[in-house]
Image (spheres, grey):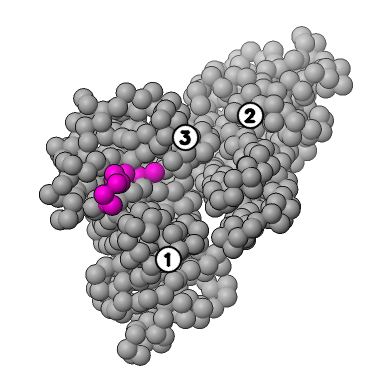
């Protein structure tokens, strides 16, 4: 979103009220006094204040001028007064006397000689960072607000200007992809609402209402299912919509806080994107055409209002990015940069997790439970070990799976959070299965190993689906967990091997093998330093490595392959020029895949990418390449689709682990080199 967005007035009031105004001579004054030369207002997010009373001047980048009333004053630094809001007509922004500013910056006791001023500044000092975050929240939605105060300082009320509120909602909805739907849902918010959180909550509530309606729709349409496959698909729909409901409720809880949207923008956007993913997965699972059409048409609005909610969050996060918050030594979510790494593990990884991973690398980790087929552990199956995990367990639950081939279908459920599972190596500890689509199982349920619980870590394990190419869709690993990470793991299959289903994921030093669409889904996922092995497909097939499933332009999802190697397996190698192999094809309308700084073998066709169905999605997809090398990396012969591009370094930076999935917040580290940015 461009910086120009913040110039548009789109709300009729601020969710803020002045706590104190201190004139430049050090005296307190009435916040709306027409006699004060200027009024610096420290704000709190509680009592509504009609924005028609005020003009907002963000002094973040612009130093305040001296005033004739305060000869000893100096310009306020951003850390001393992040925001000043002045009544229109003031000739300069307000300054605090130097002694007061000095006390504020040093957090020393105040000695101004005026108890009222001292008390007021103490209150302001406590509230300044909360107020700053609150004002940013407002500014993110409304931009820099235009005022409507006349020269006599007479406020223009919303009752005198009934068009103010409607114009504000229209301006905000104009930022969405479905503005008419936005006006129909969010536009119904009480026109006197002064808190932009009411609009954000309304957007989330609209999505929640539509998801709940989709549940009722599922119950009604499912009655027409004529076979067990589709009956199972509708059961999956109910589960998926329950996940969607939970993601939306989480977003609503976080955004109800004054600065929650600003601090947790990345999280909220990931959750909302997952809501869209679940809706689409529900529809995809139904194979009876008339039932699928009924569900798609009935859930169309659900996807649209969720997209609109993401647009609201985008507006907030874009404003935060427009401010250099690092100069204030403030972070929005406790992030640390990789440049702060000391030694083997980065400082942003929780100390407890660093110790766990370091101990595991040294062979000194004491797991909570051990799984061993020979009976030498606590359990003989992985599922038994997971079921033994205490409810509401706090901290990492560590499961060591000894070497062996485990023929079981594993589900790490949504209430099994923060599980760390490690084996004796990806060729020694293997979980294997053979469920597949041809035998009547829906794609998402063919997974040998599925993860839903947040914060899952797997290390040194193998996941396999042995159904073979002839059985079509057969998933080895499906990941629906937010902030999931896999290190030194192996995923083997043919079609649909790795299902990066939803939310944020990271894969490092892994091996993924397959034939058709064998890395697919609608998550925000980064594969780094991985070996991607293309296998020999059936005689009437071609190989496509990726098939990303983004359905809405506002989703923050995409598939990034960074510093990986793409090679044929030994059975494909002799015929690698006869059997076409491509980097990917667009599964959905806004499919997004970026391949950068990777080695691409000569098995990849010069055109690079394959269409899904004629010209379908070729204009709306986003396919990009940057800094690749190897005999298959040349871009001169690439397809000429509108959605394909060779990007520069600046654009490629957007798709690094740090920037694309916020990896410097959550990605665990396992004693191996980690690239937070580009390699070169």
Residue numbers of the magenta segment: 537-547
Circle 3 sits on which residue? 590
Residue located farthest toward the top when viewing the structure as drawn:
151
Using the image as rendered, state which of residue 156 and residue 85 is in the foreground: 156
In front of the other: label 1 or label 3?
1
Using the image as rendered, state which of residue 573 and residue 448 is in the foreground: 573
Residue at image x 34%, y 85%?
373
Circles 1 and 2: CB distance less than 8 Å? no
Which of the two discs, 1 and 3, labels the residue nearer the N terminus?
A: 1
Quadrant in which residue 359 is drawn: bottom left
Circles 1 and 3: CB distance less than 8 Å? no
In front of the other: label 1 or label 2?
1
Expressed as whole percent of the image width and height from the top left, the position of residue 51 reads 74, 25
Q: Disc 1 versus disc 3: distance between alpha carbons? A: 29 Å
Quadrant in which residue 116 is drawn: top right
Q: Disc 3 versus disc 2: distance between alpha carbons? A: 16 Å
Circle 1 sits on which residue? 435
Using the image as rendered, state which of residue 392 and residue 94 is in the foreground: 392
In the image, 298: left or right of 635?
right
Expressed as whole percent of the image width and height from the top left, the position of residue 660 reads 40, 42
Circle 2 sits on which residue? 178
């Amino acid at each position: 979103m461009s910086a120009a967005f913040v110039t548009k007035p789109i709300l009729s009031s601020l969710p803020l009220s002045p706590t104190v105004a201190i004139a430049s001579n050090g005296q307190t004054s009435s916040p709306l006094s027409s006699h004060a030369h200027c009024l610096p207002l420290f704000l709190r997010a509680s009592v509504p204040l009609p924005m028609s009373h005020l003009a907002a001047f963000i002094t973040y980048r612009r130093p305040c001028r001296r005033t004739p009333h305060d000869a000893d004053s100096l310009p306020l630094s951003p850390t001393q007064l992040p925001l000043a809001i002045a009544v229109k007509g003031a000739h300069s922004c307000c300054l605090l006397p130097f002694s007061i500013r000095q006390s504020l910056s040093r957090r020393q006791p105040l000695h101004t000689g005026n108890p009222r001023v001292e008390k007021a500044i103490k209150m302001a000092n406590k509230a300044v960072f909360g107020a700053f975050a609150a004002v940013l929240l407002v500014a993110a939605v409304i931009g820099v607000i235009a005022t409507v105060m006349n020269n006599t300082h007479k406020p223009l009320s919303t009752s005198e200007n009934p068009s103010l509120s409607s114009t504000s909602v229209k301006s905000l909805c104009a930022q969405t992809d479905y503005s008419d739907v936005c006006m129909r849902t969010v536009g119904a918010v009480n026109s006197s609402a002064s808190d932009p959180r009411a609009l954000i909550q309304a957007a989330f509530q609209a999505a929640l209402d539509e998801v709940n309606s989709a549940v009722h729709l599922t119950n009604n349409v499912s009655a027409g299912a004529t076979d067990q496959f589709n009956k199972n698909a509708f059961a999956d729909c109910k589960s998926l919509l329950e996940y969607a409901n939970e993601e939306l409720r989480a977003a609503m809880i976080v955004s109800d806080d004054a600065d929650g949207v600003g601090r947790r923008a990345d999280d909220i956007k990931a959750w909302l994107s997952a809501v869209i993913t679940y809706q689409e997965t529900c529809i995809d699972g139904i194979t009876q055409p008339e039932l699928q059409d009924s569900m798609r048409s009935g859930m169309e609005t659900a996807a649209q209002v969720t997209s609109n909610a993401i647009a609201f969050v985008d507006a907030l996060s874009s404003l935060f990015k427009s401010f250099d918050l690092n100069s204030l030594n403030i972070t929005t979510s406790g992030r640390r940069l990789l440049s702060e790494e000391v030694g083997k593990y980065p400082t942003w990884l929780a100390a407890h997790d660093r110790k766990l991973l370091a101990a595991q690398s040294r062979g000194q980790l004491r797991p909570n439970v051990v799984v061993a087929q020979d009976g030498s552990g606590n359990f003989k199956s992985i599922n038994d070990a997971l079921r033994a995990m205490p409810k509401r367990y706090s901290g990492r639950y560590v499961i060591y799976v000894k070497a062996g081939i485990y023929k079981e279908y594993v589900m790490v459920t949504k209430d099994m959070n923060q599980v760390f599972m490690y084996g004796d190596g990806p060729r020694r500890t293997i979980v294997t299965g053979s469920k597949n689509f041809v035998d009547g199982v829906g794609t998402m349920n063919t997974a040998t190993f599925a993860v839903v619980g947040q914060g899952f870590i797997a290390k040194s394990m193998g996941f396999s689906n042995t159904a073979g190419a002839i059985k079509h869709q057969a998933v080895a690993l499906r990941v629906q967990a937010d902030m999931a990470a896999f290190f030194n793991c192996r995923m083997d299959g043919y079609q649909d091997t790795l299902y990066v289903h939803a939310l944020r994921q990271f894969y490092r030093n892994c091996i993924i093998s397959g034939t058709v669409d064998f890395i697919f889904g609608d998550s925000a996922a980064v594969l780094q330093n991985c070996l991607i092995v293309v296998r020999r497909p059936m005689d009437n097939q071609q190989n496509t490595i990726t098939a990303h499933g983004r359905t809405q332009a506002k989703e923050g999802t995409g598939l990034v392959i960074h510093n990986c190697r793409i090679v044929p397996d030994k059975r494909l190698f002799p015929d690698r020029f006869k059997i076409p192999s491509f980097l990917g094809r667009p599964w959905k309308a806004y499919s997004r895949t970026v391949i950068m700084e990777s080695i691409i073998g000569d098995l990849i066709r010069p055109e690079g990418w394959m269409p899904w169905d004629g010209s379908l999605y070729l204009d709306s997809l986003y396919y990009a390449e940057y800094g690749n090398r190897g005999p298959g990396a040349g871009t001169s012969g690439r397809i000429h689709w509108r959605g394909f591009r060779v990007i520069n370094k600046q654009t490629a930076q957007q798709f690094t682990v740090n920037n694309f999935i916020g990896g410097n917040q959550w990605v665990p580290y396992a004693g191996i080199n980690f690239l937070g940015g580009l390699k070169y």
